[in-house]
Amino acid sequence: MSPSNPCLPPGCVLRQADPRDRLEVKKILFQALNWDKIIYISIGFCLFFAPVLTVVLAIQLLICILVGASILFISYKLNILKYWVIECNSYIVAFGALYCHETHSTISRLYVKKRWRRKGLGSTIINFFIQKGTKPIYLSSLPNRVSFYTRLGFIPISCEKITKTSRAFRKSALVLMKYQ
């Protein structure tokens, strides 16, 4: 995709992420999970209630473990070379990952910063992935995002059609989608 993509706002480019982008993408993913707010609230509870309530201390410990596990998960699973970013005026404002395999591709972690939403950035990344990926292309979506992906040509499918992911999707609230 060329830097002068007409679908992007002026000053924006779609490019493959490189190792220097890893920290910024991790930071955006962390903020998207709202863990930063949970940490601040947890610290506040600890400082205020911990001397009085030991139960609160146990809850805080559990929250800290969950936050730590999330950070480790994001760090471990983030293969930055599979990511494509939209950079506007030297800032990463959107990204997604495309994993191409011999028989199919998967799209993961599409994210657009709130301030940049409804400007076509997510659609631009998905359309680029559709052109670049091995068909069929799969993704999982939150129920409230299904209409977005449907407009781009994806259809919801039953998790029984893909045996490796069946068990995980049966227990989640995610919708498995496919682009032919």
Image (spheres, rainbow, N blue to C red):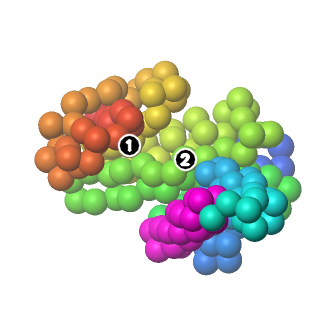
Examine the residues drawn in magenta and state their main secondary structure.
helix
- In the picture as drawn, the residue positioned furthest to the bottom comes out as 19
Q: Which residue is mark 2?
A: 110
Q: CA distance from mark 2 to mark 1?
A: 10 Å
> For mark 2, does the 10 Å Cα neighbourhood hold few (<14), some (14 to 19), or many (20 or more) residues?
some
Residue located at (18% from left, 52% from top): 164
- Does 12 sit above or below residue 156? below
- In the picture as drawn, the residue positioned furthest to the front comes out as 52
The image shows residue 170 at horizontal and vertical percentages of 25, 38
Residue located at (45% from left, 28% from top): 143
The image shows residue 177 at horizontal and vertical percentages of 34, 34
Residue located at (42% from left, 49% from top): 107
Residue 67: quarter of image: bottom right
- Residue 88 within the segment the image draws in magenta: no
- Does 36 sit above or below residue 73? above
Tell me where the magenta segment starts and ends, as one range. 55-78
> For mark 1, does the 10 Å Cα neighbourhood hold few (<14), some (14 to 19), or many (20 or more) residues?
many
Give the residue type that dot 2 points to: Leu
Q: Earlier in the sequence, mark 2 or mark 1?
A: 2
Residue 117 appearing in the image: yes
Q: Which residue is mark 1?
A: 139
In the rendered structure, the answer to whether residue 103 lies left or right of residue 32 reads: left
